[in-house]
Amino acid sequence: MASEPTVLQAEHFPPARALRRPVVPSVILGTLILVATEVMFFAGLVSAFLIGKAGAVGWPPVGQPRAPAGSTAVNTVVLLASGAVLYLAERALKRGRAPAVTVGLVAAALALGTAFVALQGWEWARLVWFGLTMRSSSYGAFFYLVVGLHALHAAAALVALAVAGLRLSTGSLSREAFRAIQVFWYFVVAVWPILYVLVYLL
Amino acid sequence: MTTRRPALGVLAATLVAPAEALACSSCSYGTGNGMMVYLATAAFMGVLPLAMVAALALWLRRRVRACRTEEAEGDAVPARPLSSVSSPPHEAMSGPLM
């Protein structure tokens, strides 16, 4: 007489492993790689600027206006404040605060970042009026190249931040995507003080 | 093969006339300050990517260790022993899976 086969029950097996999550979400890893390439990009620009400045007889050249360090210092504080506000937004999201709080903080960071870009544009208009253009001297060319490319990165990050704010308000933004946008904005904020010191102060 | 001859020609020219390599306006500024800044920025540009890759690798290593710790804690619950199956002992050891 054949014996009944042993029927193994579920409790005899180890607990089923949950679907393994990636070590680093792809969107964050991709953003980190992008930031690394942009860091090298700005490092190359800064190197070229420093070499050009070292070989110049006078800096800024005679007849060229100096970059406005005082008003740009205020602008730098505005940009740093936007980074701090975005950090507070991330903390509010992590602690499960009301969505309106997080969206409000993201909107505040967006407003501060927009104010930074707008003030930079206003300062540029004044500098062009006073004779500093890309073709007036190597000083002007480097100034608009370095500061302009940073402003371009800031503008792109602001667009991403605006999209994040909109999706947060509808509850359709994942935490990983928000963190990726944060990383890129932190990069824009962190690189500016270095450019400010090198281009405006030294 | 088509690029080997021009490359050898460039290498030969560099070996024969090294002074012309200093025609670069960035590398061979008349002032010593320009040369120092060039060397410093060249060194910085060489070290910076290595530092970023090393930092990323260290951070990924920490993340992998943290994930492995989490998975190990999740697998720490043991399975129930086979002897707890409700069947005669001699049949529990001779099933089709044994």
Image (spheres, helix red, strand yellow):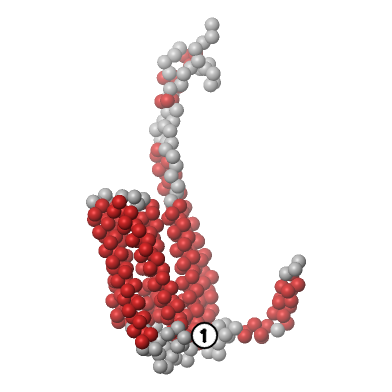
In the image, A158 versus B67, the foreground residue is A158
Residue B52 is left or right of residue A94, and the answer is: right
Residue B18 against residue A175 in the figure, above or below: below
Farthest residue to the top: give it.
Answer: A1
Q: Quadrant of residue A77?
A: bottom left
Q: Which residue corresponds to the image point at 38% horizontal and 85% vertical from the top-left? A: A128
Q: Position of residue B69 (x, y in %)?
A: 42, 44
Q: Quadrant of residue A123?
A: bottom left
Disc 1 crowd rating (10 Å Cα; few below 14, some 14-19, many 20+) is many
Residue A148 against residue A109 in the figure, above or below: below
Residue A16 is left or right of residue A97, and the answer is: right
Would you say residue B65 is visible in this rendering? no
Residue A166 is left or right of residue A12, and the answer is: left
Q: Which residue corresponds to the image point at 45% horizontal and 28% vertical from the top-left? A: A13
Q: Amino acid at mark 1?
A: Gly
Q: Position of residue A54 (x, y in %)?
A: 48, 85
Tell me the residue that label 1 is attached to.
B34
In the structure shown, which secondary structural element does the residue marked by tag 1 occupy? Answer: helix
Quadrant, the N terminus of chain A: top right
Quadrant, the C terminus of chain A: bottom left
Q: Position of residue A62 (x, y in %)?
A: 42, 93
Q: Which residue corresponds to the image point at 37% horizontal and 63% vertical from the top-left? A: A159
In the image, B2 versus B54, the foreground residue is B2
